[in-house]
């Protein structure tokens, strides 16, 4: 067969153009699909961040209300009860023992203990000062102290969340889960483990060997033991970017695992000042320039064996007055002045040179720590006895480091304060 070049199978130009256009359309469609997918992923990420922010804001709002209530309990009810207790103690010291007064004092003391516990439950300071391991260990100690319920904590010290809102939410959920074990599992102990579930995830597990339950039934009922909802817990964790897994069966105990993000993906609400036993400690202020040396009081003002001159510093009038009545009833003590804040305490101490200063650890304008530093900077031999509504280890340490010679709680027995004042007045050099 003879070959003719004109017989070659040459593609139709129209077909080539159609093929080229089709390829371009496919590429454009692929690019459009890719862009749409990226936009969708971005929207999902933004939506997730928005939901995380909503959950964080909800947790923050709840904690603000807890903080407000705890502050109200301390600054109002507890201080009034403490003042009433001091008045009862004063009356008892001035007359023959009266059984009715003794009973009244005991009732007030029980009320103080109850309010103290309630305030600590509402807004414990460890939520703002500690990491997740310290928070869980505090919770275990609280469960033992309040309910004689043993909680074993196994925590990886490296596992922590950088988001305060995450730590607060986990604290409240874990506490409710432990209370549920206490009330419904039929056991007196539980275990809490803290681990890293990945580079960006935290895992907290609450487990017990109690009665167990059917998760499907509990989730269907909506309510969970203490009156809170497992569904609510799960929703909170989901919206936060984590999850909650439940493993339980009747007679086989329960294990509830909380997975939470180490950090939130969007700017969070501004943190607020945590509840402290009274006024938040203000930022350290620069120390004043040293004053010209003042002449020491004449030796005749404080002869050996004279009455002990005491300066009281407390921002609660009812507490100041109660303490003043207690000390003035002593045959060897005089209350030379009363200060309502840290600045007044400094000024009065430098003016009057009292033998002993009884000072609240938490005061406005200047905290007890700051006031103590200023006073001792100019009166190195001053004897400062710190008072606080609570026995707080870090506050005790801070006051002692500032130079306080003693740290007592305000609900200490009256004799304890009186004896402590005498001891340090006698040691004054």
Image (cartoon, helix red, strand yellow):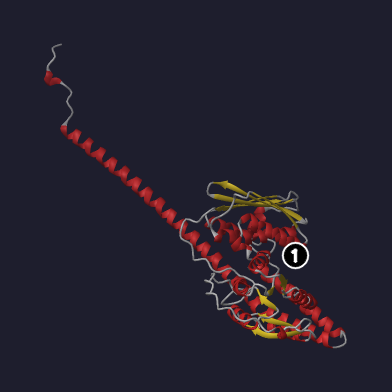
In the image, residue 15 sits, relative to residue 343, either above or below, namely: above
Q: Residue lying farthest bottom?
A: 95
Mark 1, residues whose alpha carbon is within 10 Å: few (<14), some, or many (≥20)?
A: few
Give the quadrant of the C terminus.
bottom right
Residue 321 appears anywhere in the view: no
Left or right, residue 423 beside residue 377: right
Which of 264 and 44 lies nearest the eye of the viewer? 264
Estimate the x, y position of residue 348 in percent, counting from the top left.
62, 82
| Viewer-proximal residue among 332 and 325 | 332
Residue sitting at 66 percent across and 53 percent down? 215
Q: Give the residue displayed 38% in from the left and 48% down from the top.
A: 37
The part of the image, by quadrant, that contains residue 218 is bottom right
Q: Could one spot residue 184 in this view of the protein?
A: yes
User: Residue 384 at what x, y percent from top left?
Assistant: 68, 74
The quarter of the image holding the N terminus is top left
Q: Secondary structure at mark 1?
A: helix
Is residue 182 rendered to the left or right of residue 161?
Answer: right
The image position of residue 27, as x and y in percent, is 29, 40
Q: Quadrant of residue 82?
A: bottom right
Q: How many numbered circles does the render carry?
A: 1
Residue receiving disc 1: 146
Residue 238 vs 1, above or below: the answer is below
| Image location of residue 151, percent across then percent down | 73, 55
Residue farthest to the top, as pictured: 1
């Amino acid at each position: 067969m003879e070959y003719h070049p004109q017989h070659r199978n040459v593609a139709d130009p129209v077909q080539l153009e159609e093929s080229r256009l089709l390829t371009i359309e496919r590429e454009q469609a692929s690019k459009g699909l890719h862009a749409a997918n990226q936009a969708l992923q971005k929207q999902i990420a933004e939506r997730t961040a928005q939901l995380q922010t909503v959950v964080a804001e909800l947790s923050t709002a709840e904690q603000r209300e807890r903080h407000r209530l705890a502050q109200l309990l301390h600054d109002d009810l507890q201080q009034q009860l403490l003042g009433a207790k001091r008045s009862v103690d004063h009356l008892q010291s001035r007359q023959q023992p009266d059984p009715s007064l003794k009973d009244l004092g005991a009732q007030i003391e029980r009320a103080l203990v109850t309010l103290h516990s309630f305030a600590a439950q509402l807004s414990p300071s460890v939520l703002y000062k500690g990491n997740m391991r310290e928070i869980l260990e505090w919770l275990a100690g609280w469960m033992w102290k309040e309910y004689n319920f043993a909680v074993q904590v196994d925590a990886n010290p490296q596992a922590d969340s950088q988001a305060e809102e995450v730590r607060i939410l986990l604290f409240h959920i874990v506490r409710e889960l432990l209370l549920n074990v206490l009330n419904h599992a039929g056991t007196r102990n539980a275990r809490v483990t803290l681990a890293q579930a990945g580079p960006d995830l935290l895992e907290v597990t609450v487990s017990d060997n109690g009665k167990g339950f059917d998760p499907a039934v509990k989730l269907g009922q909506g309510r969970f033991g203490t009156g809170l909802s497992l569904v609510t817990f799960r929703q909170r964790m989901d919206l936060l970017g984590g999850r909650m897994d439940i493993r339980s069966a009747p007679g086989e105990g329960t294990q509830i695992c909380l997975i939470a993000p180490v950090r939130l993906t969007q700017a969070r609400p501004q943190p607020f000042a945590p509840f402290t036993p009274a006024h938040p400690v203000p930022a350290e202020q620069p120390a004043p320039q040293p004053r010209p040396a003042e002449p020491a009081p004449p030796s005749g003002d404080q002869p050996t064996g004279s009455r002990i001159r005491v300066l009281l510093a407390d921002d609660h009038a009812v507490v100041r007055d109660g303490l003043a009545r207690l000390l003035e009833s002593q045959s060897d003590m005089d209350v030379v002045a009363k200060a309502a804040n840290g600045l007044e305490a400094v000024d009065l101490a430098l003016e009057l040179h009292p033998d002993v200063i009884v000072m609240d650890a938490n005061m406005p304008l200047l905290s007890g720590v700051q006031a103590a530093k200023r006073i001792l900077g100019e009166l190195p031999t001053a004897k400062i006895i710190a008072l606080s509504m609570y026995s707080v280890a870090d506050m005790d340490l801070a006051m002692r480091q500032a130079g306080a010679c003693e740290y007592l709680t305000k609900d200490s027995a009256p004799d304890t304060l009186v004896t402590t004042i005498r001891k340090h007045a006698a040691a004054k050099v």
